[in-house]
Image (cartoon, rainbow, N blue to C red):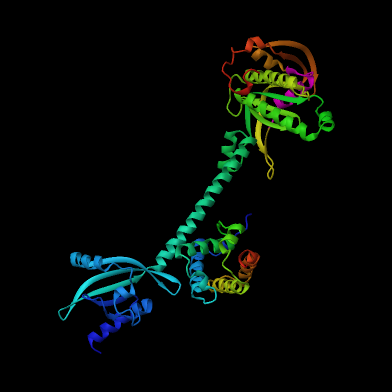
Amino acid sequence: MVQRTLFEKYGGFSSVSRVVLSFYDTLLDSDDVGPFFDDVDMGRLVDHQTKFIASLLGGPSSYTDEQLKQIHAGLNIRDTHFDEMKAVLCQTLLDHGFTEGDVEVVAAALEIRRKLIVE
Amino acid sequence: MSIAAINEQLLRAIGVGIALLDAADLTFKFQNDTFQDWFSPDSSQPTLEDLLPQLDVEVMKSQIAETGNYTIEFSFKKKRRTMIFAADFSSAMENDHPLFVMVCQNISRIREMESMIDSYSKMVERNTRELKREKEQVEKLLLNMMPRSVYEEYKTFGVVTPTLYDPVTVLMLDFVGFTEMAVSTDPSVTVSELNDIYSAFDRIGEQFGCERIKTIGDAYITVAGMPEPTPDHAMAIANTAIRFVRYLKRRNEGHPNTWLCRIGIASGSVVGSVVGIQKYVYDIFGPAVNLASRLQDCSESMEITMSEPVYKAIQNEFLVEPDGSRVLRGFGEQQVYKLRDNRIEFRGQAFPGLGGDTESI
């Protein structure tokens, strides 16, 4: 029996899309991490976050570790930025009805990628 | 409160951005709250051109003059967020003074959703392509394990009903001294050579419509007459057997390792079915299989031994000779026959135009 991913458990794309948009809004409004997106094209940013969240939740994804590293290279992202982003994501997931246990799973999956993103 | 005051309050509060512009110099005469909230023009931006330099004012004016209104989509960067608006301009009069009414709708969400759906559908399409590739690989693998018709049945119903095939001819082959060879020479060499030989056997069998059932170590089993019945199943197997021997003879001439086979051929009935639940294999059972195995034991190196029904079916086409009678376990006393190769008889006659590297075998 194939285990159900969080992506499926929380209703697939139709509900995850709300998580993505809400995450996108909060990040843009944040003065800590928002500036990283000052000059990023909206389409590209949405594309990135859709793929990113889908892959964290075990949905269809297309990011390899190498790609993640490449995308964030040279942006001078610090641990504090990463922490802020992680906090935003966890809060967003809680707001959208994810259980605390599941949020922890996502946070752990995110933590594994810290070294790819933080310089 | 007067009607005019109510109207103004409504206008201020709705979720559509509304501004009134002086038609002459495009200065703002009125902005509702939503408009202010979105664009928050300051005193340095008294006209529409100052606020939105990307708008082509001349085009707008001429369009309004011509058709009465003008519609445009534009983006506006608020802080770091790119917002996208659909604006509609139309003309109006206030106390004989010409005005433009600008009505803006925020369509950022729609565009963001579109981007997201776009992104998602690309991921899904990619996954679908990968799944399709994977499915094809699985299918290929399963088709190596069972005949196509059996595979189709398995795919449709999830099970395979055991099927009786009667009559068929079974060929069983093994190699003389394989066990010694496997331990004395480099095993990887032995396996790779065995792989070459089996691949060649598969190609030869395919040309005569044989279905290779399985290999177990040095034993190779192929059948003619299933899953599609054929009247010439004995002939097909005889042709295949002779070519197996020819192939090995020719191969031995050019290789340091000598491969010598023994072949048994028997006609009769078999049951074909998938066996096992987790690790399923397609296999055949029945008297023809057992008899072919006994007859293989009767063969000396590079010999082909067959049962009486096979002999009767092919005696007019092949070089065959009786080899007396033997007592075979489970079958009692049986007349057995040898199938010999009459090369000249077959060259370019019975089966002309065989392609590939097995042509002259």
> Which residue is depicted at the point 74% across and 30% down?
B193
Residue drawn at x 77%, y 12% is: B323
Relative to B138, say whether B86 is above or below. below
- Where residue B205 sits: x, y (%)? 64, 25
Tally the marks: 0
Q: Is residue B118 left or right of residue B287?
A: left
Q: Is residue B6 magenta?
A: no
A11 on left or right of B92: right
Outermost residue toward the left in this view? B96
Place residue B287 in its image quadrant: top right
Left or right of B108 in this view: B216: right
The reply to whether residue B255 is visible in this rendering is yes
Position of B348 relative to A71 (above/below): above
List x then y, in percent, for residue B40: 37, 79
Q: Name the quarter where the C terminus of chain B is drawn.
A: top right
Q: Which quadrant, please, contains the N terminus of chain B?
A: bottom left
Q: Is residue B316 visible?
A: no
Spot occupied by residue B234 in the image (x, y as percentages of width and height): 64, 19
In which quarter of the view is residue B187 placed? top right
B314 is higher (above) or lower (below) than B6: above
Q: Which residues are magenta?
A: B284-305
The one of A22 and B336 positioned closer to us in this rendering: A22
Which of these two is toward me, B262 or A23? A23
Residue B291 is situated, as x and y percent measured from the top left of the image, at 74, 23
Q: In the picture, residue B108 is in which quadrant?
A: bottom left
Q: Is residue B2 left or right of residue B40?
A: left
Q: Which residue occupies the foreground of this view, B226 or A100?
A: A100
Residue in front for this viewpoint, B286 or A28? A28
Q: Is residue B292 magenta?
A: yes
